[in-house]
Image: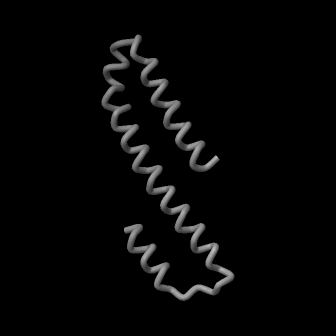
Amino acid sequence: MADDLMKKARNRRVAPSQEHEVVLTQKIVNDAIACNAQLARILQVTFEDFAADIKDPDSLMNLKIQSQAVWGFLEQRWL
């Protein structure tokens, strides 16, 4: 879907003064897609391990580390 939107955006005629806005918008979309993919990978592992973490208090530290990884990734992308 994002690829279709990018193709449509490229095919539209854009005034030279607006080209930087199109490039910036495409970068934001690409970053959002990459972030969603990364979060999906991290959260899948987190939820799979969550039940085990609740039963084993010693492994709660692993969940904390994974949560910090999510926030670190988000901070690098947008903050």
Residue 27, percent from left and from top: 54, 63
Q: Quadrant of residue 25?
A: bottom right
Q: How is the image coloured?
A: one colour
| Along the viewing direction, whichever of 52 and 29 lies nearer the viewer | 29
Residue 54, percent from left and from top: 37, 18
Residue 4, percent from left and from top: 39, 74
Write the residue at 36% across / 26% down: 50
Write the residue at 42% across / 21% down: 62
Write the residue at 50% across / 33% down: 69
Residue 74, percent from left and from top: 55, 43
Q: Quadrant of residue 57?
A: top left
| Along the viewing direction, whichever of 11 and 50 lies nearer the viewer | 11
Write the residue at 54% across / 88% down: 13
- In the image, residue 57 above or below residue 45: above
- In the image, residue 4 above or below residue 46: below
Say how many tags the image has. Answer: 0
- In the image, residue 41 above or below residue 68: below
- In the image, residue 29 above or below residue 23: above
64 lies left or right of 4 = right
Q: Residue furthest right?
A: 17
40 lies left or right of 27 = left
55 lies left or right of 9 = left
15 lies left or right of 8 = right
Quarter holding the N terminus is bottom left
